């Protein structure tokens, strides 16, 4: 049982999702005095919250699960190649129970402020329930997409029916049979929910501002025999994920786009269109990401696929993106999404032509007409990457606010540390390698690295770690420079910091949120920093800078704060 009167910990982990669970597992193994705080009522992060119908992985399930325990890998049976939210939440609960991690977790525990006390190298945290906690280290496992952003529409509070953002889809079943339902938003979430509910509701109206390029997920069951095969190949599977840019099983086609004939290109695309998961995106020619002409040719191929699947060609044309090419934004994967528009009970409203003016008591008003609904679903996305950091009053050295420092975009060292904010660790932070890759693979890398850094500090008796400003600047420049080669730099997407529902996050003010160099390069760089005794980081012991080599080392076990 968690002791609610305890006010100091060596490490406080904020967030009990995929990253927080793994982080506390490692700290528990080391015997460190640590706790996890989460604002939600239970563990699971993304998979605790996003309960909307159709919510599932776009990562192969067996590449999404943790790799750290052979026993766990041998016990867990993924039932689908791309597993759905209820099973994913069950998985995370199983992990927490198997390793007895719940006893370290505190729920309904919203962190409102975290201030660094320079005199004592301590973080002071204010919790919404009135408690004040201190810790030497804070680990931010807050998630990249954990702050939902509903639209800012006039009259939203007036609606007499049921309305919610997909992130807050109710835990109790939502009765949809015979109901008139609106979905606003056609990103990865909207596409999943629309395809799943179209045949379960009375009437479905989709309000689309911009279409997204989307391709079949090609999901399927995993039988006992399949699972036995996967188990026997886990080492190989994780090794493949570690060597591919995206951290998936998918490796890019190394042939040059222009070195092969048009027929060979189409033959590849035909194969990929029928292949599972992100193959269509990540097993493709590398030029798709960088070369306008190559991207345009492939986008046209996908546009034709859409035309073949949608009966009404006027509707098909509305579902084909015009303002960006395939794969320059996060590609939503779909299951019979385009066929939904062949149903009589589904209607597509192009709100780029007839914008929503307001929410009324009974539905939505566009510039063209009024619509009545029982349920309005806002699938309008998230204040991505930095949103969860911005919601906490984080103050570092001299009272500097992180939110102010990151006003025009984040600047970090390796995506894991921030100058001016000592002992503040972000295993999968902004500008780290995880956001643009298979997230849990990146999380394990980040958590391992942060934990090794902590062990190094305990071993040497250091009480404070902070990256040098120049080292951080170099990293931020490196991250920025990598955007220059990518077509995605122009996209109106959360990868570039765009969110029309957050003031100041309009398109055009690009934020360099993610590391685009791919998994192997990222891991190589962070490992090199560690191997060079954390070059770029200044360590201090009791407010005195310590020269690393001056400290003798002995058994770490004796030095870990318990
Ligand atoms: P996304 O990908 O940010 O998509 C949000 C969608 O909602 C997108 O189609 C937006 O259109 C639309 N949107 C947002 N605000 C509005 C307003 N105010 N009016 C109308 N339409 C709006 O979020 P998702 O939740 O789908 O996916 C997020 C990630 O979750 C995904 O990448 C996965 O990694 C998991 P826009 O394009 O801005 O015109």
Image (spheres, grey):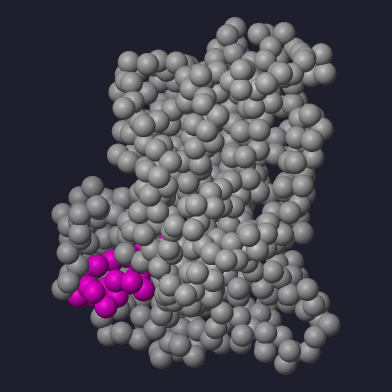
The vertical placement of 63 against 134, above or below, is below
Instruction: Point out the image quarter for the N terminus.
Output: top left
Q: Which region shows up in magenta?
A: 180-208
On the question of residue 312 being in view, the answer is yes
Q: Residue at x 69, y 26 (%)?
A: 456
**Does the segment drawn in magenta span residue 195?**
yes
**Does the segment drawn in magenta span residue 429?**
no
Left or right, 332 with reference to 479? left
Left or right, 284 with reference to 37? right
Choose between 334 and 107: the one closer to the eye: 107
The vertical placement of 248 against 196, above or below, is above
Q: Which quadrant of the view contains residue 26?
A: top right
Q: Residue at x 70, y 15 (%)?
A: 540
The vertical placement of 143 against 360, above or below, is above
Choose between 116 and 218: the one closer to the eye: 218
Residue 54: % across, % down: 36, 66
Q: Residue at x 33, y 58 (%)?
A: 86
Left or right, 99 with reference to 290? left
Residue 483: % across, % down: 72, 54
Residue 194: % across, % down: 35, 70
On the question of residue 383 being in view, the answer is no
Q: Which quadrant of the view contains residue 477?
A: top right
Choose between 21 and 561: the one closer to the eye: 561
The vertical placement of 167 against 200, above or below, is above
Residue 143: % across, % down: 49, 44
């Amino acid at each position: 049982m968690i002791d609610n009167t305890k006010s100091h910990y060596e490490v406080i982990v904020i967030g009990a999702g995929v990253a927080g669970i793994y982080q506390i597992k490692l700290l528990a193994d080391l015997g460190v005095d640590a706790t996890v705080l989460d604002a939600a009522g239970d563990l699971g992060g993304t998979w605790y919250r996003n309960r909307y119908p159709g919510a599932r992985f776009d990562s192969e399930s067996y590449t999404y699960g943790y790799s750290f325990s052979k026993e766990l890998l041998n016990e867990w049976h993924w039932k689908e190649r791309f597993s759905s939210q209820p099973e994913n939440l069950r998985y995370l609960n199983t992990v927490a129970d198997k390793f007895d991690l719940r006893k370290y977790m505190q729920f309904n525990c919203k962190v409102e402020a975290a201030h660094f006390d320079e005199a004592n190298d301590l973080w002071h945290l204010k919790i919404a329930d009135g408690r004040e906690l201190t810790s030497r280290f804070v680990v931010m496992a807050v998630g990249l997409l954990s702050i939902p952003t509903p639209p800012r529409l006039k009259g939203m509070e007036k609606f007499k029916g049921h309305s919610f953002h997909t992130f807050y889809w109710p835990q109790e079943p939502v009765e949809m049979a015979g109901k008139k339902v609106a979905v606003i938003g056609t990103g990865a979430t909207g596409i999943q929910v629309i395809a799943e509910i179209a045949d379960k509701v009375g009437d479905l109206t989709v309000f689309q501002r911009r279409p997204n390029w989307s391709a079949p997920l090609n999901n399927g069951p995993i039988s006992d025999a399949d699972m036995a095969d996967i188990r026997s190949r886990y080492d190989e599977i994780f090794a493949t994920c570690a060597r591919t840019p995206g951290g998936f099983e998918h490796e890019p086609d190394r042939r040059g786009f222009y070195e092969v004939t048009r027929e060979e290109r189409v033959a590849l695309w035909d194969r990929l269109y029928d292949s599972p998961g992100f193959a269509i995106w990540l097993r493709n020619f590398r030029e798709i990401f960088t070369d306008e002409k190559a991207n345009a040719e492939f986008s046209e191929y996908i546009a034709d696929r859409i035309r073949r699947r949608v009966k009404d060609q006027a509707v098909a044309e509305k579902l084909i993106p015009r303002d960006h090419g395939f794969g320059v934004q996060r590609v939503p994967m779909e299951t019979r999404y385009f066929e939904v528009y062949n149903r009589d009970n589904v209607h597509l409203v192009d709100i780029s032509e007839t914008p929503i003016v307001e929410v009324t008591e009974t539905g939505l008003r566009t510039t063209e007409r009024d619509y009545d609904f029982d349920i309005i679903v806002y699938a309008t996305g998230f204040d991505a990457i930095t949103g969860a950091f911005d919601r906490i009053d984080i103050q570092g050295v001299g009272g500097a606010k992180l939110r102010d420092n990151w006003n025009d975009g984040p600047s970090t060292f390796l995506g894991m540390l921030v100058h001016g904010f000592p002992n503040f660790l972000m295993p999968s932070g902004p500008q780290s390698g995880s956001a643009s890759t298979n997230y849990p693979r990146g999380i394990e890398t980040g958590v391992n690295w942060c934990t090794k850094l902590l062990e190094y500090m305990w071993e040497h008796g250091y009480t404070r770690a902070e990256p040098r400003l120049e080292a951080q600047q170099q990293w931020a420049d490196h991250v920025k420079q990598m955007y220059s080669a990518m077509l995605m730099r122009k996209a109106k997407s959360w990868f570039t910091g765009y969110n029309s529902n957050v003031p100041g996050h309009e398109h055009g003010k690009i934020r360099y949120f993610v590391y685009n160099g791919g998994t192997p390069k990222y891991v190589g760089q962070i490992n090199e920093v560690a191997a060079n005794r954390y070059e770029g980081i200044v360590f201090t012991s009791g407010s005195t800078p310590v020269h690393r080599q001056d400290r003798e080392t002995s058994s770490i076990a004796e030095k870990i704060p318990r």
